[in-house]
Image (spheres, helix red, strand yellow):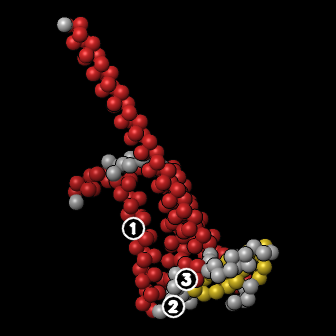
Amino acid sequence: MSKMLESIKKINFKKYLVFFIYFFAIVIASIVIDQVTKVVAMNSLVLGEPVTFIPNFIEFTLVYNKGAAFGMGDDALWIRIIFVLLSWLVAVGLLIYVGYLIYKDKKINPFFGVCLALILGGDVGNLIDRTFFFDRGVVDFISVQSWLPGFGIFNIADSCLVVGILLLLVYLIYDEYKSSKEDKTHKEAVKKIEETEKKESQEETKVNE
């Protein structure tokens, strides 16, 4: 325990100042915008009655979702409890992971940090509804069913989650491609050095003969 405290004291938090600013700014902004828009939706919309926002594109339809994101899932009590626990696990897990990266003094790519912030903000936005308004459920109000029939009604938190996950996938794919390319370049460089050394060794042998 004492070693861990000593390690924490050695962390250069100034190095992560910019990360803290944009990370928590995105998280807090996502949560605030999500919760404010939900309150506005509940006070401005009639339950289940669609209101056109952009013709043939976006409608506002207030629903209370007791399942998963985008209106998916059952409203059975045990399923709802699982979603609550999963939301908490994601939130706590992400914070622990970020703390681990800082504790290990890892360099955090800004794009990667934005992805994590969007996912955390979106998760907490719905976590608040699922935990503190359990009987009511999650407030959903954005609908694109006019051009995408069957697509669930969602909210800002769902949007943050989806965008964050998609961007994270893009980042991971790019990072894997970049790593494989660098590894290939490194192997080629090593091979070239070995060939050069072998050639020089052969020339040196010939001279000695």
Sequence-first disc among 2 and 1: 2
Task: From the top left corner, tell me how far across and down residue 175 is, in percent.
Answer: 46, 50
The answer to which image quadrant residue 160 occupies is: bottom right
Q: Which residue is mark 1?
A: 93
Q: CA distance from mark 3 to mark 2?
A: 9 Å
Q: Nearest to the eye among marks 2 and 1: give it.
A: 2
Residue 116 at least partly seen: yes
Q: Which residue is mark 3?
A: 72
Q: CA distance from mark 2 to mark 1?
A: 25 Å
Mark 2 touching mark 1, by CB under 8 A? no
- Report crowding for label 1: few under 14, some 14 to 19, many 20 or more residues within 10 A (C-alpha): few
Task: From the top left corner, tell me how far across and down residue 58 is, in percent.
Answer: 73, 74
**Near-viewer residue (166 or 137):** 166
Task: From the top left corner, tell me how far across and down residue 63 is, in percent.
Answer: 64, 86
Quadrant of the rendering where the N terminus is positioned: bottom left
Sequence-first disc among 1 and 3: 3
The amino acid type, in three-letter code, at marker 2 is Asp
Q: Which residue is mark 2?
A: 75
Quadrant of the rendering where the C terminus is positioned: top left
In the figure, 44 relative to 186: above or below?
below
The amino acid type, in three-letter code, at marker 1 is Gly
Q: CA distance from mark 1 to mark 3?
A: 23 Å
Q: Residue at x 26, y 52 (%)?
A: 6
